[in-house]
Amino acid sequence: MFEKELKRIEKLQLDRHIISRSSSPGPVITVKGRKYINFSSNDYLGLAGHPKVIKSAIEAVGKYALGSGASRLLAGGTVLHERLEARVSEFKRTDAALVFNSGYAANTGVIPALARDGAVIFSDELNHASLIDGCRLSRARTVIYRHGDTIQLEKLIKEEGKGEKVIVTDSVFSMDGDIAPLGDLYEICKKYKAVLYIDDAHGTGVLGNGRGALEHFNIRPEPWIIQMGTFSKAIGSFGAFIAGSEDVIRWVLNTARSFVFSTALPPGVIAASITALKLVRTDRVLIKRLWANRERLIAGIRNAGFDTGGSDTPIIPIKTGTISGALGISGFLYGKGIYAPAVRPPAVREPRVRITVSAAHNDSHIDAFLYALKGLD
Ligand SMILES: *Cc1c(COP(=O)(O)O)cnc(C)c1O
């Protein structure tokens, strides 16, 4: 089965392989007994391996056991789940929040709950796959606008006339590292009475002192703004949340199928998220170091003459133009003990090496990367 199809993707250099570590996901990973400096992790603050985070997870497993046993609506959740939601809504300056099992589950559950039959969703063409799938699962119609093009978006909204509207966007685009024009999107939503659904997976813990993209833009959360974020990236744990008004959260917990019909996250994971979130709020050095590392790395890559597109964040693409170019650079770096993965269609339209830098890297990790890059030409 699938022999022909597999041959075809192989020939196009589009077949994917799983890489398995035998180490933590830190700045240096071990693969097949060899060490690599790791530029692929979304653990932007290095919290996945933080001793306090790990300790709180172990303690919670001891007290509440490993699995949660049931959905939140059937007592699968603990007081820790509730505490995490209180901390998230405080952090995001909203009335309420709800924990989801993953970012993927949040987007595929919440978008269909918000955008019902007869509504129109406006979706940025470079939105994350989980947002796209959320739109596909919704009974609403989806209109796609050009990446970040709020002029086209407004034109498309005008064409739709009356009726419910939901604008869906990544805050930080996961493959390009650029930031959505949230200021303009906010104005458009206000003017046309649209709901704004923001996927802040790469903004949470990174932008706006860690509070995310809205804080970065100095935008006050409104009842018609729903923020989604993940604990699986800068928070170093697992799972996701949405934050918004009491009514929206109540509606979602009643209707989002990925919430209702899925077992609650294990308490150990929730405890880790609580501790990591606290570290994001209190340890100012982490975010500073992340951004200093990002500046050092991107300046070096640009100086070496590579195209980093519109990156504004610790996600840095090196655009190569071709698939073989991306695989070539990634393979060359791998040979030098650096893991910087190639990303190809259909995950992206333009092939690239996608790099992420974290607060856990030190100068010598970054300089080793830049030195290796020089050896390419
Ligand atoms: C990673 C990611 C998700 C999915 O989150 P998971 O917790 O990994 O399922 C959703 N949206 C964006 C923009 C992401 O980068």
Image (cartoon, rainbow, N blue to C red):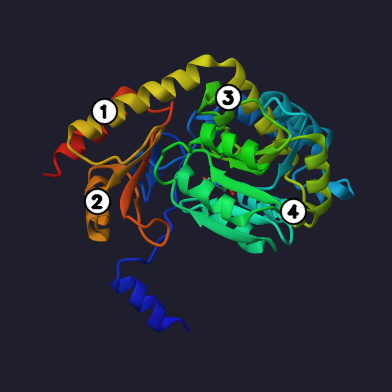
Residue 53, relative to residue 16: is it above or below? above
Residue 109, relative to residue 7: is it above or below? above
Camera-side residue of 65 and 131:
131
Characterize the local packing of mark 2: few (<14), some (14-19) or many (20 or more) Cα atoms within 10 angstroms: many
* Gap in angstroms between the C-alphas marked 2 and 3: 33 Å
Disc number placed over residue 113 in the picture, else none: 4
Characterize the local packing of mark 3: few (<14), some (14-19) or many (20 or more) Cα atoms within 10 angstroms: some
Considering only order in the chain, which callout, 4 or 2, is on the residue closer to the N terminus? 4
Disc number placed over residue 215 in the picture, else none: 3
Residue 201, relative to residue 49: is it above or below? below
Q: Is mark 1 within 8 Å of ligand 1?
A: no
* Label 1 with label 2: CB-CB less than 8 Å: no
Q: Where residue 123 sits in the image (x, y, percent)? A: 55, 52
Residue behind mark 1: 299
- Decide if residue 324 is on the left or right side of residue 183: left
Type of amino acid under label 2: Thr
Disc number placed over residue 320 in the picture, else none: 2
Mark 1 residue element: helix
- Decide if residue 370 is on the left or right side of residue 348: left
Type of amino acid under label 3: Glu
